[in-house]
Image: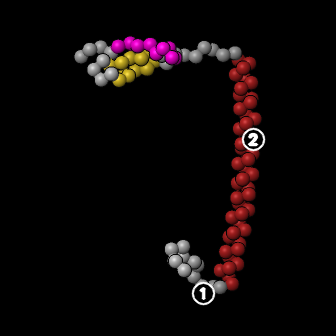
Amino acid sequence: MPEALDVTCPCCGSLLKVDPETSSVVWLDKKKAPAQDFDDLVNRVHSQKSILDEKFARSVQQTRNQKDILEKKFEEARKRAAADPTGRPPNPFDNE
């Protein structure tokens, strides 16, 4: 069995181990990105934190609105059921 070939990717510089029989990549060693400045990383975290806080606030507001809407729908269904206790609820599969 022939040994795997070592090939360097021209785009990203990763080391690829290629099986000559099947012509498939057997192993991939990605090239590590250079270390970044600590201040840049801190600024990125702070900017992401504000975006995440905004998304969380929107989801909380949507959840509150959804709860109110569901309560109103339930109360309306309860009123209709109390008004006609012998009636059956509508079947969605009936073609009337």
**Above or below — where is 23 with respect to 51?**
above
Q: CA distance from mark 2 to mark 1?
A: 49 Å
Circle 2 packing at 10 Å, graded few (<14), some (14-19), many (20+), is few
Q: Position of residue 77 (x, y in %)?
A: 67, 74
Task: Identify the colour scheme used.
Answer: secondary structure
Circle 1 packing at 10 Å, graded few (<14), some (14-19), many (20+), is few
- The mark that comes first in sequence, 2 or 1, is 2
**Above or below — where is 3 with respect to 85?**
above
Q: Position of residue 95 (x, y in %)?
A: 52, 77
Q: Secondary structure at mark 1?
A: loop
> Residue at horizontal 54%, vertical 16%?
32
* Image quarter (top left, top right, bottom left or bottom right) of the N terminus: top left
Taking depth in this image into account, of 92 and 49 the one nearest to the observer is 92
Residue wearing tag 2: 54
> Residue at horizontal 66%, vertical 16%?
36
> Residue at horizontal 51%, vertical 77%?
94
Q: Which residues are magenta?
A: 5-13
**Above or below — where is 76 with respect to 55?**
below
- Residue that lies at the very extreme toward the left in this rendered image: 1
- Residue 72 image-quadrant placement: bottom right
- Residue that lies at the very extreme toward the bottom in this rendered image: 86
Is 70 magenta? The answer is no
* Image quarter (top left, top right, bottom left or bottom right) of the C terminus: bottom right
Taking depth in this image into account, of 94 and 32 the one nearest to the observer is 94
Task: Indicate the amino acid at tag 2.
Answer: Glu
> Residue at horizontal 54%, vertical 76%?
91
Task: Indicate the amino acid at tag 1.
Answer: Thr
**Do the numbered discs 2 and 1 sit on residues whose CB atoms are within 8 Å?**
no
Q: Position of residue 35 (x, y in %)?
A: 63, 14
Residue wearing tag 1: 86
Q: Position of residue 29 (x, y in %)?
A: 46, 18
